[in-house]
């Protein structure tokens, strides 16, 4: 099934098209992307990348309650400038294309129930460890850098800006 890149669409599943990703990766000489054998496999990687990006807690709020993806958004400010609420920021698109390259070869989100030892008993002493790690040990530096200004600290914290 073809990607749906309708901005704010209720069935959208990607921020970028395969053609946009092809151009981006060709411009940066990412031959691993060109080596992906079918358009369908590229679409799968882009869907996984969009899904990964949408696990982040972004500034602002969705433009509509019916949109399937996290972008576009209202009330987003980057470097003191309002981000348009009728478009997808270039950094978000670039982050998706970079994440798609990763997703084409490996999982973006680790399985947090990896069978690690979370409790051990030695004699009468039992020690329990956390069974959760915040990031599962995987970092994607370029993707994280591209998203850095757009993501919030999470929880119930809200950006406060003096006007």
Image: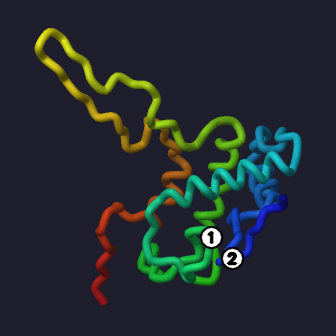
For residue 81, above or below residue 55? below
Tell me the residue at 51%/57% (across/down).
55
Q: Mark 1 vs mark 2: which is more N-terminal? A: 2
- Furthest residue in direction front, as rendered: 124
The secondary structure type at the circle numbered 1 is: loop
- Furthest residue in direction bottom, as rendered: 163
Residue labelled with disc 1 = 68
Q: Is 31 left or right of 122, judged from the image as shown?
A: right
Tell me the residue at 11%/14% (across/down).
124
Q: Is 113 left or right of 146, judged from the image as shown?
A: left
The secondary structure type at the circle numbered 2 is: loop
Q: Is 108 left or right of 17, judged from the image as shown?
A: left
- Whether tag 1 and tag 2 are in contact, CB under 8 A, the answer is yes
Q: Where is residue 63 in the image (x, y as percent from the top left)?
A: 55, 82
Residue labelled with disc 2 = 9
For residue 128, above or below residue 89? above
Tell me the residue at 65%/42% (across/down).
102
Q: Position of residue 66 (x, y in %)?
A: 60, 78
Q: Where is residue 54 in the image (x, y as percent from the top left)?
A: 55, 60
Tell me the residue at 80%/50% (across/down).
26
For residue 4, above or below residue 22? below
Counting other residues with Cα less than 10 Å from the Cα at mark 2, is it few (<14), some (14-19), or many (20 or more)? some
* Image quadrant assignment for residue 118: top left
Between 110 and 19, which is closer to the camera in this rendering? Answer: 110
């Amino acid at each position: 099934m073809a990607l749906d890149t309708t901005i704010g669409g209720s069935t959208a599943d990607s921020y970028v098209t395969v053609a946009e990703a092809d151009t981006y990766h060709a411009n940066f000489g990412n031959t691993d992307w060109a080596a992906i054998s079918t358009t369908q496999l590229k679409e799968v990687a882009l869907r996984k990348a969009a899904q990964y990006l949408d696990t982040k807690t972004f500034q602002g709020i969705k433009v509509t309650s019916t949109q399937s993806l996290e972008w576009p958004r209202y009330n987003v400010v980057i470097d003191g400038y309002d981000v348009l609420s009728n478009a997808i920021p270039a950094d978000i698109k670039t982050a998706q294309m970079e994440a798609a390259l990763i997703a084409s070869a490996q999982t973006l989100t680790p399985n947090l129930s990896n069978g690690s030892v979370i409790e051990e008993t030695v004699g009468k002493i039992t020690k329990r460890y956390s069974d959760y790690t915040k990031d599962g040990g995987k970092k994607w530096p370029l993707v994280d850098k591209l998203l850095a200004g757009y993501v919030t600290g999470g929880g119930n914290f809200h950006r406060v800006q003096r006007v």
